[in-house]
Image (cartoon, rainbow, N blue to C red):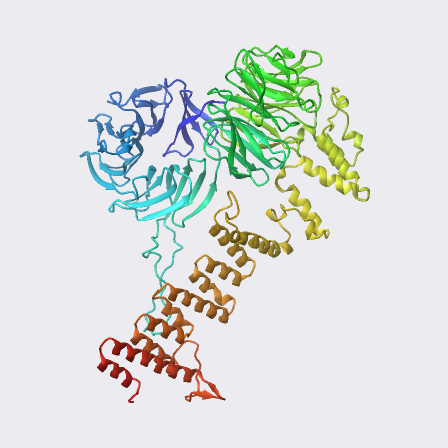
């Protein structure tokens, strides 16, 4: 591999999309040809890690890089003479460089941003201005304890002088690089708002956007205004960077076809433009966004939606991974970024993240059985237990002091005991309540440890001195039972064989894996193929001779210890492989974690394909399952010897009338990846007529039979509705009550229950959306809902109440509403409209007040008018206007 340490900066060649430059913390820069997936040029020693790289096109094609206080160096990597020169005056900076940019049009001009907030403008062959325009400070401001560093720069694409500058504390400024003056200071919503990144929108002259450092707020600005014209929250966590990819304006836009004919009062209204007081039409552009939680996505600004988003990933090295014992499809990962994440390997989604940040987490281990707890070891904060059900850290252990804890292991046969090893040279065995059982002193840091799966009191450790030690906790002595020597460098991992009691393996910085026979006190095999220190290490739980290792060389090796041969090697990871874990119920599905910040799932069934073929061919059990002794004989075909395969055989044979189908079903899950295999067999059962009550809880999460779509959709909606009955909604990570109710409403709508959709929207306060959909239920339902909304608006004393009373023809409520507000003339007008039969929904009625002994709507309207007139007259009288009161009576022919 060309890069072994963390990448510090990247820059794409704007003139050639196949060329990318990357810099790393191993003081190396590589220019890549992406189309050929290989490097074009390598700069092997930059002295210090470059923190910025950018392309310079003044004389052909060159790459600039810098770090610390400079200088800015220009590497001409093409041609017969490869040279590196310094940018004029760039070695005279007194503050560290945080970012720099070459001008896209004035090719000899560059700007440098500094940690103290100042800007330097350098020019090849011209005058330079060093550390100008430093932000003003306020002596009373507590934030002045921090430096107001430059965090992002962007040249105006329409100007040769203008530049956008984002600062850590003082926000965004538009500056003139020629006159060294500030043109505009942009106002952020609050003093606590921090901008992390910015970029121009090239399809909209004068417009740019910023991304917040502390939240996923995207703000759209115009240089003519000091405040943002639009705020969009596209994610919860803060931005790392944003880059605009501009598209051509869409031609599929609404075009108004205005009719030249005379408009009448019944003509259809013209569709309004998208731009209004509450909605700003954003320019067409797509944004590549990266976030501080590791999320990466492509956001369509014009449509205000994600085209894709990879959310909640780790942003740093993943040191360890382990499957949960109570749910085989849950994988826990521990990372340099200070968090533990839980993943559903069937759906490839992140389920949960540990609370807070623990600095660096090197290792983790699940509690046995279904306790749903994890213990983890950190670089400086000791150990902690995360209770996932409670959503919090419930216990901490500090016996290692401030030393790093490299490995933790919860005893799989005794849930009361936890072991840890650390940089202080101790392996400590403790009770969960904190009581120390044993402390085993080593001559140096202890990196690895493992409980013997067949003896709850026996453990092994790997030490800095290159030795493997075996201890027995049931004795009072702190001396090892045995010491295995042979490695020439530190031992990082040790693992007991889950199948053959006397075997254990160890991985070392000497790039080898050794197999030790505890009963013979000897190293039986040394496995050599890695070209870097060995880190990940594990045994396969079904094939006793199969050992798997991961290394700093980014490779995963699969070993046959009978012959010391590497059966297969994969190198898909981009960096060191630290963690390896086997799926508990699918032993040929492997998870690996790496410094490239990814977790990968592997299928290794090709290594045991004869077993799979024998099952499909219906061969005898003797050609599928066997003893460990038979499996360990060199030259024999692989056979299964583990606990899971024996249990599957028992399950299949418990149904003698359907053994063959049972074998195919159970062993297909055994060999296949979790994504889809369970779903497949449940659909087979449904097609064959299985009762719905026999379906698993996970059935509705996959692809369902068409006949179940409505039923399960309605059921899910009802479960989401239960959020309103609980104090805390749906639990940790399930979203707020409003979010869950909105999801339930959409499910009801999709399954045809429009009325329930409307009622949930009413609960959420979204009355007008509910009213827009209500006619889909019935006219009478819409009318009833409108009356309820009018009543709600009257209680809120909203002017809009009159609109909905009028729409449904509720003249009584309308007159009452106007009267209560003192709008007497409006009350009389509403009553007169009803008298003239103009109220919506009112049918023509006899002019007399009664029909068949019942009062007609016309009669009711007349009575309502007289009542309104009386109220109006009385109101005028009470306000000292008897003449006006008399006029009110005459207005309704009330001469008396």
Taking 877 as reference, is 388 above or below it? above
Q: Nearer the viewer, residue 222 or 691?
A: 691
> For this view, does 124 lie left or right of residue 859?
left
Q: Quadrant of the C terminus?
A: bottom left
Q: Is residue 572 visible?
A: no
Taking 351 as reference, is 841 above or below it? below
Image x and y of residue 33, in percent: 44, 29
Taking 105 as reference, is 853 above or below it? below
In the rendered image, which quarter is residue 103 located in?
Answer: top left
Q: Total of numbered circles in the picture? A: 0
Image x and y of residue 122, in percent: 24, 27
Q: Nearer the viewer, residue 866 or 684?
A: 866
Image x and y of residue 273, in percent: 34, 59
Image x and y of residue 655, in percent: 79, 42
Q: Residue at x 50, y 20 (%)?
A: 400
Q: Is residue 755 visible?
A: yes
Q: Residue at x 28, y 31 (%)?
A: 148
């Amino acid at each position: 591999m060309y890069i072994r340490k963390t990448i510090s900066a990247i820059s794409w060649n704007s003139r050639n999309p196949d060329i990318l430059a990357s810099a790393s913390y191993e003081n190396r820069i590589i220019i890549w040809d992406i189309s050929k997936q290989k490097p074009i040029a390598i700069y092997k020693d930059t002295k210090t890690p470059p923190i910025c790289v950018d392309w310079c096109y003044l004389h052909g094609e060159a790459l600039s890089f810098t770090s610390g206080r400079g200088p800015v160096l220009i590497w001409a990597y093409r041609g017969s003479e490869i040279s590196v020169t310094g940018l004029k005056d760039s070695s005279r900076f007194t503050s560290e460089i945080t970012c720099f940019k070459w001008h896209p049009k004035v090719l000899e001009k560059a700007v440098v941003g500094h940690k103290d907030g100042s800007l330097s403008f350098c020019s090849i062959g011209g005058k330079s201005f060093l550390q100008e325009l430093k932000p003003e400070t306020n002596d009373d401001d507590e934030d002045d304890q921090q430096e107001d560093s430059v965090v992002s720069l962007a040249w105006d694409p329409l100007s040769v002088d203008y530049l956008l500058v984002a600062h850590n504390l003082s926000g965004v400024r538009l500056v003139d690089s020629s006159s060294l003056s500030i043109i505009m200071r942009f106002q952020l919503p609050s003093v606590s708002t921090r901008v992390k990144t910015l970029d121009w929108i090239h399809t909209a002259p004068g417009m740019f956007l910023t991304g917040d450092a502390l939240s996923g707020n995207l703000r759209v600005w115009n240089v003519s205004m000091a405040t943002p014209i639009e705020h969009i929250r596209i994610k919860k966590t803060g931005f790392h960077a944003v880059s605009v990819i501009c598209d051509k304006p869409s031609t599929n836009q609404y075009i108004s076809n205005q009719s030249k004919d005379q408009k009448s009062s019944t003509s259809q209204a013209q569709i309004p433009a998208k731009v209004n007081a509450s909605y700003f039409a954003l320019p067409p552009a797509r944004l590549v966004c990266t976030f501080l939680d590791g999320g990466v996505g492509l956001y369509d600004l014009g449509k205000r939606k994600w085209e894709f988003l990879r959310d909640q990933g780790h942003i740093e090295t993943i040191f360890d991974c382990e499957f949960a014992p109570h749910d085989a499809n849950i994988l826990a990962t521990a990372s340099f970024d200070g968090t533990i994440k839980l993943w559903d390997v069937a759906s490839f989604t992140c389920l949960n993240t540990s609370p807070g940040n623990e600095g660096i987490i090197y290792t983790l281990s699940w509690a046995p059985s279904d306790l749903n707890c994890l213990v983890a070891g950190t670089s400086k904060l000791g150990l902690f237990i995360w209770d996932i059900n409670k959503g919090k850290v419930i216990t901490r252990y500090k016996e290692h002091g401030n030393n790093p804890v490299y490995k933790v292991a919860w005893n799989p046969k005794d849930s009361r005991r936890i072991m840890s090893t650390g940089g202080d040279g101790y392996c400590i065995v403790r009770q969960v309540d904190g009581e120390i059982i044993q402390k085993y002193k080593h001559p140096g840091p202890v990196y690895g440890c493992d409980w013997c799966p067949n003896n709850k009191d026996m453990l092994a450790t790997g030490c800095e001195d290159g030795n493997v030690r075996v201890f027995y906790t049931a004795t009072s002595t702190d001396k090892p039972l045995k010491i295995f020597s042979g490695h020439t460098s530190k031992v990082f991992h040790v693992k007991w064989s889950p199948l053959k009691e006397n075997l254990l393996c160890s991985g070392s910085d000497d790039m080898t894996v050794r197999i030790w026979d505890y009963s013979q006190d000897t190293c039986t095999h040394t496995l050599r193929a890695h070209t870097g220190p060995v880190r990940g290490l594990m045994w396969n739980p079904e094939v006793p001779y199969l050992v798997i290792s991961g290394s700093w060389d980014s490779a995963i090796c699969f070993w046959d210890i009978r012959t010391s041969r590497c059966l297969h090697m994969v190198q898909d990871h981009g960096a060191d492989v630290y963690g390896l874990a086997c799926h508990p119920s699918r032993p040929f599905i492997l998870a690996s974690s790496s410094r490239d910040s990814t977790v990968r799932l592997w299928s290794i069934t090709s290594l045991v394909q004869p077993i799979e073929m024998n099952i499909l061919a219906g061969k005898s059990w003797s050609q599928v399952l066997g003893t460990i002794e038979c499996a360990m004989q060199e030259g024999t075909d692989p056979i299964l010897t583990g606990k899971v395969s024996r249990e599957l055989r028992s399950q299949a044979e418990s149904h003698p009338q359907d053994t063959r189908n049972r074998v195919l079903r159970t062993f297909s899950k055994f060999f296949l990846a979790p994504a889809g295999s369970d779903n497949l067999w449940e659909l087979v059962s449904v097609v064959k007529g299985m009762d719905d009550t026999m379906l698993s809880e996970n059935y509705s999460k996959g692809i369902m039979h068409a006949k179940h779509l409505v039923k399960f959709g309605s059921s899910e909606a009802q479960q989401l509705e239960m959020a309103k009955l609980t104090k805390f909604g749906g639990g940790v990570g399930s979203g707020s009550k409003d979010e869950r109710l909105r999801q339930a409403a959409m499910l009801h709508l999709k399954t045809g229950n429009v009325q329930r959709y409307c009622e949930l929207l009413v609960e959420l306060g979204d009355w007008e959306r509910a009213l827009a959909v209500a006619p889909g239920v019935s006219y009478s339902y819409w009318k009833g809902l409108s009356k309820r909304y009018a009543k709600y608006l009257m209680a809120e004393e909203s002017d809009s109440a009159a609109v909905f009373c009028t729409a449904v023809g509720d003249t009584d409520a309308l007159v009452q509403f106007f009267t209560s507000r003192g709008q007497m003339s409006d009350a009389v007008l509403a009553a007169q409209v009803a008298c003239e039969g103009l109220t919506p929904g009112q049918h023509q009625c006899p002019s007399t007040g009664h029909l068949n002994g019942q009062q007609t709507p016309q009669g009711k309207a007349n009575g309502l008018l007289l009542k309104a007139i009386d109220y109006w007259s009385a109101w005028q009288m009470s306000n000292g206007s008897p003449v006006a009161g008399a006029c009110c009576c005459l207005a309704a022919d009330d001469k008396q």
